[in-house]
Amino acid sequence: MGVTADLPPRIVLYDGVCGLCNKTVRWLMKRDGGRIWYAPLQGETAAALRARHPRIPEQLDSVVFVEEGRVHLRSKVFLHASRHLGRPWKWAYGFRWLPAFLLDWMYWIVAKLRYRIFGKYDACTLPTTDERAKLLP
């Protein structure tokens, strides 16, 4: 699928060189039932989505979930994406009403330390054959 074509209704944008981000995306892929697609923040899909949604940051310190035209950032990504996971993970969706400022303080701490703790790749990691079907450029 090219970025000029219609994009899927649910896309998680993540830092493609972050070890934690890559592990999280692989974890989500195993549980999303094929309902979510993924693209690195450094890629063409993210650039195309930024043109449509200026709220999507240029910085790589925020994960983004674009769901049917709505943009969710940081900790809210996991709460909104959880709706598309199997049980018991989908129950986290019930916490989406919690204010972002309460949840994001922990998110920011992890975001600042993630390269030190989980490492950083020189380039986006190579996906497995199964993962390749869910990744956008």
Image (cartoon, grey):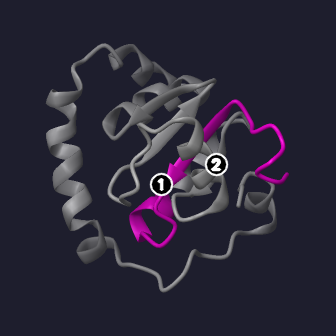
Q: Is residue 121 above or below residue 76?
A: below
Q: Nearer the viewer, residue 132 or 136?
A: 136
Res 88 seen here? no
Question: Where does the magenta region start and end?
Answer: 1-24
Quick one: label 1, few (<14), some, or many (20+) residues within 10 Å? few
Quadrant where the image shows the C terminus: bottom right
Q: Nearer the viewer, residue 88 or 119?
A: 119
What residue is disc 2 on? 48
Q: Secondary structure at mark 2?
A: helix
Label pair 2/1, CB-CB below 8 angstroms: no
Q: Position of residue 78 (x, y in %)?
A: 42, 35
Compute the Cα span from label 2 to label 1.
23 Å
Quick one: label 2, few (<14), some, or many (20+) residues within 10 Å? few
**Is residue 6 rendered magenta in the image?**
yes
Which is more N-terminal, label 1 or label 2?
1
Q: Position of residue 133 (x, y in %)?
A: 81, 55
Q: Seen in the image, is 59 located left or right of residue 1?
A: left
Q: Position of residue 37 (x, y in %)?
A: 68, 44
Q: Quadrant of residue 35?
A: top right
Q: Quadrant of residue 115?
A: bottom left
Work out which residue is located at the far bottom of the displayed protein and give it: 122
Res 62 seen here? yes
**Is residue 12 rendered magenta in the image?**
yes
**Residue at left offset 67%, top offset 76%:** 126
What residue is disc 1 on? 24
Q: Amino acid at mark 2?
A: Ala
Q: Secondary structure at mark 1?
A: helix
Look at discs 2 and 1 and give the one toward the viewer: 2
**Residue at left offset 85%, top offset 51%:** 1
